[in-house]
Amino acid sequence: MDINLYKYFFKRILDIILAIIVLPLFVLIFIVIGSIIYCEDKGSIFYNAPRLGKKGKTFNMYKFRSMKMNAPDIRNKDGSTFNSGNDLRLTKIGRFIRKTSIDEIPQVINVIKGDMSFIGPRPDLPEHINYYEGNEKRKLEVLPGITGYNQAYFRNLVTWKDRIKNDCYYVDNISLWLDVKIFFKTIESIVLKKGVYIKPKGKDEEGENLHV
């Protein structure tokens, strides 16, 4: 299959087909997880996170809320979001859905809307566009993904700049076969809980992130 034909046409068709298939499962998960989230602290079920999309367009990325209402925004030194198993901002259900990546499931709505693809570079925060250097903006040439090359092979174990390099690698090498490999590698990473939190030297995976 021609790479550009897949990149700009068939990939979107596959996204729509897969979204329709998983939509009933999303509704079921929404009923169960959404009810638990609401009952825990009577707050909103979704967290609408502003993110950079294709061609730099900003959109709201949907996630199940994993943090307490009005939790403070804490960032790492590189500007990426702080992520730790000991984060006191997490709710009880939030800790579980983070580890299992269930919090990302509502992004199927973004796929249906055309904001995202199932597989692609994970979207950055809107302000990150000011920190791209050289040709790093190339990651914005395609739709961001629910999962991607970074999430499948590294998750949170590499720096933000390394993630961008990997995103650009994906954009340059996008193909049906690469997407298939990323899909199954993502399942493996989720099942084995690889790289959910940054692992500081001398601490286990539940240790605090040293880059705050």
Image (spheres, rainbow, N blue to C red):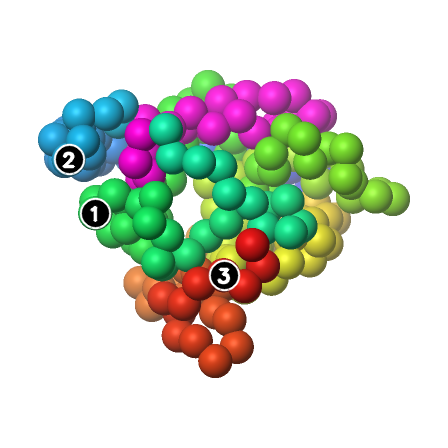
Judged left or right of residue 121, residue 117 is left
**Residue bearing mark 2:** 40
Kindly identify the amino acid type of the residue bearing the numbered disc 2. Glu
Camera sees residue 71 = yes
Tag 2: Cα neighbours inside 10 Å, few (<14), some, or many (≥20)?
few
Residue 109 lies, with reference to residue 73, above or below; the image says above
Tell whether position 114 is magenta: no
Q: Position of residue 38 (x, y in %)?
A: 17, 28
- Choose the circle earlier in sequence order: 3 or 1: 1
Magenta includes 52? yes
Q: Quadrant of residue 212?
A: bottom right
User: Which amino acid does the dot numbered 3 rest on?
Assistant: Asn
Under circle 3, the secondary element is: loop
Q: CA distance from mark 3 to mark 2?
A: 26 Å
Residue in the image at 69% along x and 36% along y: 128
Residue bearing the label numbered 3: 209
Q: Are marks 3 and 2 in contact (CB under 8 Å)?
A: no
Which numbered dot is residue 92? 1
Q: Is residue 122 left or right of residue 22?
A: right
Please say if the residues under marks 2 and 1 sit with CB atoms less than 8 Å apart.
Answer: yes
Measured as percent of width and height from the top left, residue 118 is found at 47, 39
- Mark 1: amino acid: Lys
Q: CA distance from mark 2 to mark 1?
A: 8 Å
Q: Is residue 131 left or right of residue 125?
A: right
Report helix, strand or loop for mark 1. Answer: helix
Residue 73: horizontal and vertical position, in percent? Answer: 49, 37
Q: Residue at x 51, y 71 (%)?
A: 200
Q: Quadrant of the N terminus?
A: top right
In the image, which residues are magenta? 46-69
- Residue 84, horizontal then vertical, whole percent: 42, 56
| Residue 5 appears in view | no
Residue occupying the point 64% across, 58% down: 159
